[in-house]
Every structure is written in structure tokens, then in C-alpha cells.
Amino acid sequence: MAKKKKNTTSGGVIATNRKARHDYTILDTWETGIVLVGTEIKSLREGKASLVEAFATIDNGEVWLRNLHIPEYSMGSWTNHSPRRTRKLLMHRREIDSLEGKLRDGNRTLVPLSMYLKDGKAKVELGLAQGKQDYDKRQAIKRRTEDREIARDLGQKFKGIKA
């Protein structure tokens, strides 16, 4: 008998923060675990989460994820969780210490880039980010369109299509 297919697979991406890569230059990334309570994992397995306004902070040597929205589980009862509560991220001590030093250096912040399931456990890809100026964003868009046009022209050349 075939197994029942779920919305997300064991390695499926639950949510991505596409705006983060547009607004920030990502300097480094880490895979972190996340401490969940109650029905949060059930909501995540349904593919419901939003990283739009989320950010991470380091308080007292621990990494905390703030403003992550995981909606209440639809089949839950009084045991449901608060949708925007602060959640703890799991990292090694040496990673936290080096990260804290990098944050002290300058205008940098911790931004969650994506959330996914790996071996049945929820993981967050956390990025060390530095803000982009408006002209940097415009240059990135221009570079991306130029690369796209070059790839299209090369593809047409190899296919023998005359422009």
C-alpha cells in the first residue's frame, strides 16, 4: 500500500525570505536548529510559516529568533501556541562566540534566510547580513538582467538562431 503524501517532504523548504537577499548582502550562513513547543511542528509540516519580518539576536550568550510567524495549528485546541513568540535557536558555543564578535564589528544583523525540515527536524538557515544601499540594489538588478540577456544571446547563437 502506498504511503500518504504530505504537503512537505522530509527535506522540503517550508519558507524562504526572498526579500533578505535583495535588501542585504549575505556575508556568511549557518544551519541552526530551532526549539519548538506544542503544535508548532504540526503547523510547519503543513507548510505554514512566514519569515518576512523575522530577525535574530544574541542575548546572554543565546541566539533568539524574533517575529517569526507560525500560525496556530488548525486542528489544535487550548494547547495551541502563540504565533509570534520568541524562539530559541540551537548553535554551538564557539559558533555563537564568533558570531557575536562579527556582529560587534559593524553594521551587521542576523537574518533568517529559509526554514526547512531535515530528517524530521525543523532547521533555520541563518545569515550574517550587511544592509545594501539603494544604488547597490539597482546595480545588482542591472547586473542580473545583463547576465540574463547574455545567456539568452549565447543560447540563441548555439541553437543557430539569427537575431
Image (cartoon, rainbow, N blue to C red):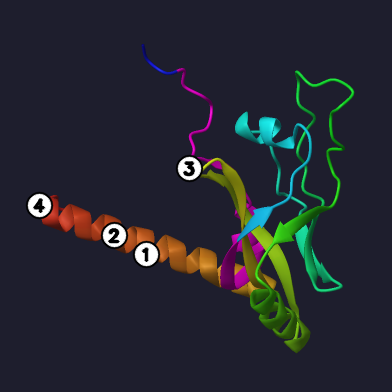
Q: Alpha-carbon distance for marks 3 and 2? A: 31 Å
Tell me the kind of residue under disc 3. Gly
Mark 2 in CB contact with mark 4 (< 8 angstroms): no
Q: How far apart are the two marked residues, 3 and 1, measured between alpha carbons? A: 31 Å
- The three-letter code of the residue at mark 1 reads Asp
Q: Return the residue at label 3.
A: 11
Q: What is the secondary structure assignment of the residue under circle 1?
A: helix
Q: Residue at x 61, y 74 (%)?
A: 136
- The local secondary structure at tag 2 comes to helix
Horizontal side, residue 79 vs residue 1: left or right:
right
Q: Are marks 1 and 2 in contact (CB under 8 Å)?
A: yes
Q: Earlier in the sequence, mark 2 or mark 4?
A: 2
User: Alpha-carbon distance for marks 1 and 2?
Assistant: 6 Å
Q: Residues within 10 Å of mark 3 (few under 14, many from 20)?
A: some
Of labels 3 and 1, earlier in sequence is: 3
Comes first in the chain, label 3 or label 2: 3
* Residue placed under numbered mark 4 in the picture: 160
Of badges 4 and 3, the one in the foreground is 3
Pick the quarter of the image with the C terminus. bottom left
- The image position of residue 9, as x and y in percent, is 48, 34
Q: Which mark is residue 151?
A: 2
> Which marked residue is nearer to the observer: mark 1 or mark 4?
1
| Residue appearing at x 37%, y 64% in the figure | 147
Vertical relation: 42 (above or below) 58: above
Residue 37 appears in view: yes
**Which numbered tag is attached to residue 93?**
none
Percent coordinates x, y for residue 5 in the rendering: 46, 21
State which mark lies toward you, 2 or 4: 2
Q: Which residues are magenta?
A: 4-31
Foreground tag (3 vs 2): 3
Q: Which residue is mark 1?
A: 147
